[in-house]
Amino acid sequence: LRVKAPPTIAHGHGQLSRAGSKVFVINGGIESDELHINGSRSLLRSHVAESYAVARDPKPTSPKSKQLDHLLLIRFGNLQQEIQRILRKASVVGVSFSVSVLRNLLSPHLREHLEEYLETLVNQKWIYPDLTCSNTFEFVHTYVRQLLYDLTPPSERNNLHQLTAEYLLQTHSGEASQLASIWYHFKQFNPEQALEYGVRAASAFLESEELYDYVDCFEILLNNSVCCVTVHDIRVLQHLTKKLDKAVTNVVVQPEVLCRTKGWLWRLFVHRKCITENNSTTPRVTSYSARSNDAILNNKTASQVLVQSAADSVKCANELDRGRTRLQLLEKISLLWRELDEKYTELSASPASHDQSLSHPKDWQIPFL
């Protein structure tokens, strides 16, 4: 059965491109694999991660990838024109998008039926509601979001990024993740403002004591280095990079968690006696086998001991992840510092550095110098 894609896809086809094997590619000479992190948390917030996808070089797609694109385009073409527009605008907002931000981008007619259209998209498995955040939806996969994003002409995308950034500026509460969203949208059309809000977002992440917030801070600083055009821009990033290095160095990985006496398997079979029958060894539970010594003292049942053992194992794995992430992050911060230092020397020696309009820091830069 041969199926042709119906010619009902709204507003043209942009060039489709796919992510490479890297999670992100760094401009300015530093290329990096994915940092090792706890599997329960993504490496970056969606907007931070998307900043690398937008600027990546187009790569040839495999036959399977082209086939998947074709099938997705058929599904997309079967949607109503109004739902197509909503889906494309949502792809510009991000992998995760709030209803209020999306509504701001729509015409009055589309706003009136937005809830109905979103329900249709959920039922057809294009998006799903984020249960951790009210009135927020996510695309079922970043691949789907990227394909729809590429369908939107660049001029329209830039306009939607600008409208989104302006709306977020009016409604944000100063949280790091919201500032990162503003930075992401400005980066698509205004590098100067992207630098400012990238610095503000990175500074907000530095106020946290969470290691993975420091990862986000690093990614923003690294991606912002391409926006620097003056020595003051570089000095601001150097200042924050130095603070980040100190913060990551001071992160404590709890060694006592990694050095627990025995493991959960040992606790499972603790104090069991064995008897040999027919040349085989069979564990037999005694009155003491259901409880370890500390469990007896604390009047804990065997099931409670096992639950505690499993929790200790998870905590140990988390600490191992934190330790690896910390070491990798420190290495990458060192590379970033070297890159910023080289760029500072380059900008200092350029004729543009003597331009009077560039010789003084901007107002927003002064607190960071």
Image (spheres, helix red, strand yellow):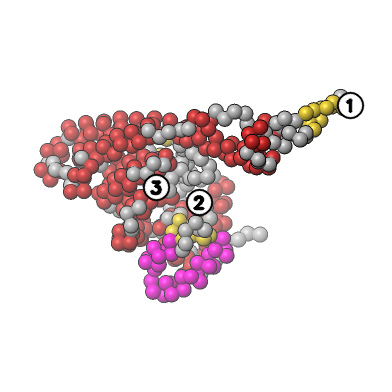
Q: Secondary structure at mark 1?
A: loop
- Give the image quarter of residue 124: bottom right
Question: If you read the primary sequence from the N terminus, does the residue marked by circle 3 or circle 2 appear first?
Answer: 3
Residue under label 3: 48
Q: Which mark is residue 143?
A: 2
**Disc 2 residue type?**
Tyr
**In the rendered picture of this protein, how many numbered marks are placed on residues?**
3
The magenta span reads 98-127
**Disc 1 residue type?**
Asn
Q: Secondary structure at mark 2?
A: helix
- Look at the picture and state if 136 lies above or below 68: below
Q: Residue furthest right?
A: 278
- Look at the picture and state if 203 lies above or below 173: above
Residue 36 pos. (x, y %): 48, 36
Residue under label 1: 278
Residue 11 lies in the magenta-colored region? no
Left or right of residue 274, residue 74 in this image: left
**Disc 3 residue type?**
Val
Marks 2 and 1 sit apart, C-alpha to C-alpha, by 59 Å
Question: If you read the primary sequence from the N terminus, does the residue marked by circle 2 or circle 1 appear first?
Answer: 2
Residue 288 pos. (x, y %): 73, 33
Q: Nearer the viewer, mark 3 or mark 2?
A: 3
Q: Secondary structure at mark 3?
A: helix
Graded by Cα atoms within 10 Å as few (under 14), some (14 to 19) or many (20 or more), the crowding at tag 3 reads many
Residue 327 pos. (x, y %): 43, 30
Q: Is residue 115 visible?
A: yes
Marks 3 and 2 sit apart, C-alpha to C-alpha, by 16 Å
